[in-house]
Image (spheres, helix red, strand yellow):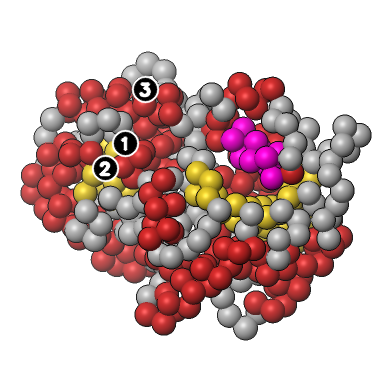
Amino acid sequence: MQSDTPTAGRRLTVLHLVQPVEGGVARVVTDLVRAQTREGLRALVACPPGGVLADAAREAGAEVLTWRATRAPGPTLAAETLAAARLLSRVRPDVLHAHSAKAGLAGRIAARGTPPTVFQPHAWSFDAVGGTTAALALRWERLGARWADRVLCVSEAERREGEAAGIAGRWAVVRNGVDLDHFRPGDGDERAVARAGLPLLSTSAPQGPLVVCVGRLCQQKGQDLLLRAWPEVNATAPTARLVLVGDGPDGPRLRHAAPPGVLFAGAAADIRPWLRAADLVVLPSRWEGMALAPLEAMACGRPVVVSDVSGARESLPPGQAPLCLVPPEDPTALAKALGRLLSGPERLDALGRQAQEHARAEFDVRRTTAAVTGLYHELLGLPRPLNQERNSR
């Protein structure tokens, strides 16, 4: 299935096999193909219809192919793997880049190392499930590592977790990044401007400090823990408001369980107004590789409170962990951290300035995309382009 090594007369072709098609995975893939097409690579994205990925990837310059796959393993896996093999045979890519558990499973079985294959977990599959399913997921990840030329992790913590679980991968670590031209503080009195443009805020009361949580409404992101913590936060900061930005399968249950005054904004095509309106951004995830929402918030000059899962410590500015990092699955610790920070607006501003400087220094998406494309060149025995050398520094 593998094509000949790219030459000066033919573009390097990368096939991104992807499921899921929303959330952080979709944003990472879109950033990659935008950069890759700009650098002259031929980027193809094979994914299921629905979600945001197909349109976003097409707009970013990718050729989009339909690959019908469910999100979870099941009886459709054989057909999904066969479909992936047919795509590989038809496209003949130089590199297969499989994203997340389902695409990683079907793609690695279909390719079995030809063409060179990069598997990017975007958080480990065995963290998302329990019992027998978790044991099967771990067993597969140990077996499937043999068919990945590189297991690409987005944080050192994600890599260490894989190693500790007995996965004998050929590892690469490239931290997530964000578009620093897109995610940046607003102009002037940005909080007032942002809040004035968000009708949900102008019709709510009281007008106190604003805490924003951005993420898919699902077990992974831990909004249920935040709702359990919020009454204690309000006991410390009675005028504080909480907004959940996002949609997902747990939406109805979370709305039913929410304390009075918590606002649900739904999905937002552009989350920047919410980040700029916030005094503090929180993400109490149960598991991650390295979450994008805290990086985006910091790039907008907002401090974050995050749970101590993979990638979180690596995301935070030096010295902020004692204030901004909480144990996962601990609503009491989460409430105390939020209450302490909301009681000191001057400290919040200082933490936000430090967060912005840290994000601009460490999480530029151009560095991320250059490193990934450089990895492709390494696997193919090709020299890294000069512009990628500059961007990766």
Front one among 165 and 331: 165
Q: Is residue 172 above or below residue 189?
A: below
What amino acid type is highlighted by mark number 3? Glu
- Residue with the most extreme right position: 9
Stretch in magenta: 370-379
Q: Is residue 268 visible?
A: no
Please tell me which residue lies in front, 286 or 302. 286
Tell me which numbered mark, 1 or 2, is placed earlier along the sequence.
2
Q: Is residue 291 left or right of residue 304?
A: right
Residue 267 image point, x, y percent: 47, 51
The residue identified by callout 3 is 357
Mark 1 vs mark 2: in front: 1
Counting other residues with Cα less than 10 Å from the Cα at mark 1, is it few (<14), some (14-19), or many (20 or more)? many
Badge 3 or badge 1: first in the primary sequence:
1
Relative height, residue 261 to residue 42 (above, below) = below
**Real-space Cα separation, disc 3 to disc 1, in angstroms:** 11 Å
Dominant SS type (magenta): helix
Q: Is residue 348 magenta?
A: no
Is residue 348 shown left or right of residue 272? left
Residue 104 percent location from the top left of the image:
60, 63
Circle 1 is placed at which residue position?
316
Label 3 near label 2: C-beta < 8 Å? no
* Residue type marked 2: Val
